[in-house]
Amino acid sequence: MHHPIFVQAVRLPPTYGVGDIVRRLGQEQSGTRPRSLAWQLAYIRDLIAQARFPQPLPLPVRDRATGTRSLSADVHRASRWPRALVDQWFDDLLPPGTSGDAAEQRAGEAIMDERARQLGLHLIDGGAA
């Protein structure tokens, strides 16, 4: 069996979506119930307005009445955020001196997750099978 000497870096998508952000903030559920999409969108809008969270990338939307298309900076179901900006926002929440550790930890976790996925492994209920 051939084992490569160098581990190939995991290629992460360049953007985050609404669900990615809400999960990363640990807000995907209220107790045992999943949060509604309307709640998630409102929560992210509040983060943008009150906590300097990055704006989403402009999203093309069509006016249903006129059919005209325009770019919207509002938070929608399909909104996307640049990964680097969101990661930086989270890193800025950490105490000074720990952001490099967090970035290294994320990279290590991504590599381990990819290796586990390739082996067909996955966690159930946070590791309790």
Image (tube, rainbow, N blue to C red):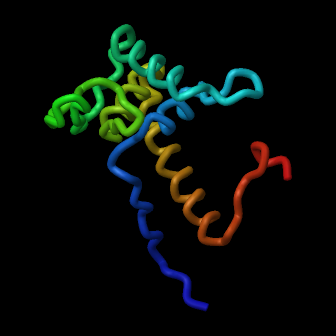
Residue 34, horizontal then vertical, whole percent: 67, 30
Decide: is 46 above or below 56: above
- Identity of the residue furthest to the front in this view: 65
Residue 124, horizontal then vertical, whole percent: 77, 50
Residue 14, horizontal then vertical, whole percent: 33, 49
Residue 6, horizontal then vertical, whole percent: 45, 73
Can you tell which quarter of the image residue 82 is in? top left
Numbered circles on residues, count: 0
- Identity of the residue furthest to the top in this view: 50
On the picture, is 2 further left or further right than 46? right
Quadrant, the N terminus: bottom right
**Residue drawn at point x = 35 percent, y = 41 percent:** 83
In the depicted view, which residue is nearer to us: 18 or 102? 18
**Residue drawn at point x = 40 percent, y = 41 percent:** 16
- Identity of the residue furthest to the right in this view: 129
Decide: is 110 above or below 25: below
**Residue drawn at point x = 55 percent, y = 62 percent:** 114
Decide: is 113 above or below 34: below
In the depicted view, which residue is nearer to us: 94 or 76? 76
**Residue drawn at point x = 39 percent, y = 17 percent:** 45
Can you tell which quarter of the image residue 59 is in? top left
In the depicted view, which residue is nearer to us: 126 or 2? 126
